Each structure stands twice: as structure tokens, then as C-alpha cells.
Amino acid sequence: ICFCTLLGLHERMWLVIAAVATCSWIQTFPVSELGVMDMVQNITDFAVGGRVMYIASLTEGVITADLSDPSKPRLGEQYNNFTEGRMAHAIATGDEVVCVAAGKRLLILDNDLGYLGELPTVNSTQVAVTGRTAFVMDCIRGLNCSVSMVDLSAPATPVITASVPSPSPRSVKATQDMLIIADILSGLTMYNITSTGLVEFSSFGGNTLSFALQSDGQTLFVGTTKAFVAADVRQGTSIEYARAAADDVVSMYILGTVV
């Protein structure tokens, strides 16, 4: 597992690479530290593809790190052609592409951080990628927010193929055939990804704070201000099968069969 930790007053982030030993419900679990990388500052997001980590930084752009030996992570390529209003806020990897939500543009790079193309945006701050399709969250000061589906088949000329409104989006995730948007105001909404666009098939009302999708794409866990919910989301349906009262479930992560 990899995670960021914030130290000090100057927003210096450390990337910690750790191995999970055991885990149990509502208990702490030990980890054995494999390595620490403190060479990159102001980290906003990261994505891992195989043994390569792609790091987004507000001040240093996008940097790769080789995790072949986690105890000695090595920095690799860097892309830092950013101007004012175009900083790296979020990053995601797909089929031979790396997408960066960079404020006024969605930046598209190859796996070696070579420039492929870009899509103008108003203020993109989140991105998810599956295959050669990106989903970018775009809004300005909480107004006129939307999540757009972008075809990356020709990265030099990305094309928006569908867009859905979201009043106050918090995060976005995508699988091969499903898009999930968590919105603080309208809750969590799920869409089937089709050849013609996005088709809504289910939603959870209320103030959604967090969610996690099992790796098999069959079970979705949703955290709200009042409850923790589990639902079966196979085959374009959503069937809630468990709910527990809980206050402000702000974060969750799936480790095997434990959430």
C-alpha cells in the first residue's frame, strides 16, 4: 500500500510504502514499512501502475518513481510544463496513458510522461481513467459542476462524448463499465458506461462522504453523514443488502474481505 502523510507547516508530503500484515474490524493493524520517499514536495495525488508510481505535485508537476525495490524508490521521469492555473491536482492511469487534472486543462501523457495532448477545462480537479476513456470533474467555485466522459482513442485530439451535471462533486471513480460520482449535496450516483454515453442506473441520496468499490466491481460500500451502506452493483443494478448507523464516514478502504 502507499499513502501520503503531511508533516510541518510547509505542506511537505512524505510517500510511505508499506506492507499490510493483518487487519481486523475497527481495530488498528500493524504495517511493516518498506520505504519512504521524501524527495517530492506538495504532493496532491498519486497513482500506481505495476511497479511505477505517478506522483502529482503542485510545485513539481508530474514525476515517476520506480518501486521495483520499495525500500529504495527511485525518481524517474518528470513533466513540469505547467503555467499559472494549470497545476497538477489529480492523476490517474489507463491503457498506455496518464491523465492529469490540471485546472484549466486535462493533460494527457504517455507512460514515460511524454506529452500526447490536452483538453481545455474550466477548473478540473479530479480524474478517473478506464482503458482509453477518462472522466474529468470540472467546475468553478462550486458552480456549474459536471463530470465529462472523454474519448482518448486519439490522445492528440481528445473528445468529450458525454457529460452529466453534479452540483457539488467530491470524487469520481470508474470501472470498465461503470462510473461512480460522489456528491456532497446529491449523494452517490452510478452510471452504466455505454457506447452512446452514460446511463444512470442507481443512486444513494444523502450527504455522501466516501465510497469504496471491491476490485471485482460487484460490491459497493458507501459512507454518509448518517450511515454505512453495502450494496450489490452487478449487472447494472443496485441492491442494498446491509446498512448500519454511523456518523460521518469520511474515509474507507478495502483490504481483502474487510472494510
Image (tube, helix red, strand yellow):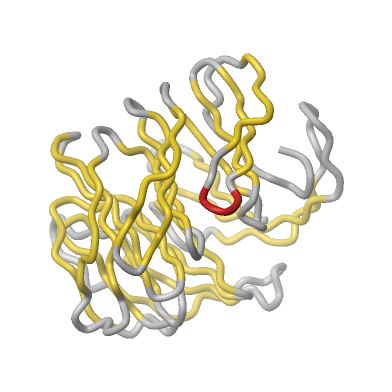
Residue 134 relative to residue 175: left or right? left
* Residue at figure coordinates x 23%, y 46% from the top left: 146
Q: Position of residue 84 (x, y in %)?
A: 13, 58
Q: Quadrant of the N terminus?
A: bottom right
* Viewer-nearest residue: 36 or 228: 228
Quarter of the image for residue 141 reads: top left
Residue at 69% x, 61% y is 35
Q: Position of residue 175 (x, y in %)?
A: 51, 60
Is the C terminus in the top left, top right, bottom left or bottom right quadrant?
top right
Q: Kindly identify the residue that appears in the image at 13 percent across and 53 percent down.
A: 122
In-front residue for pair 46/106: 106
Determine whether, in the image, residue 182 is placed left or right of residue 245. Answer: left
Q: Position of residue 60 (x, y in %)?
A: 33, 64
Residue 209 is left or right of residue 26, and the answer is left
Report the residue at 79% width, 51% height from top: 20
Above or below, 157 relative to 216: below
Depth check: 210 or 20 in front? Answer: 210
Counting labels gives 0
| Residue 167 drawn above or below residue 245 | below
Q: Position of residue 59 (x, y in %)?
A: 30, 59
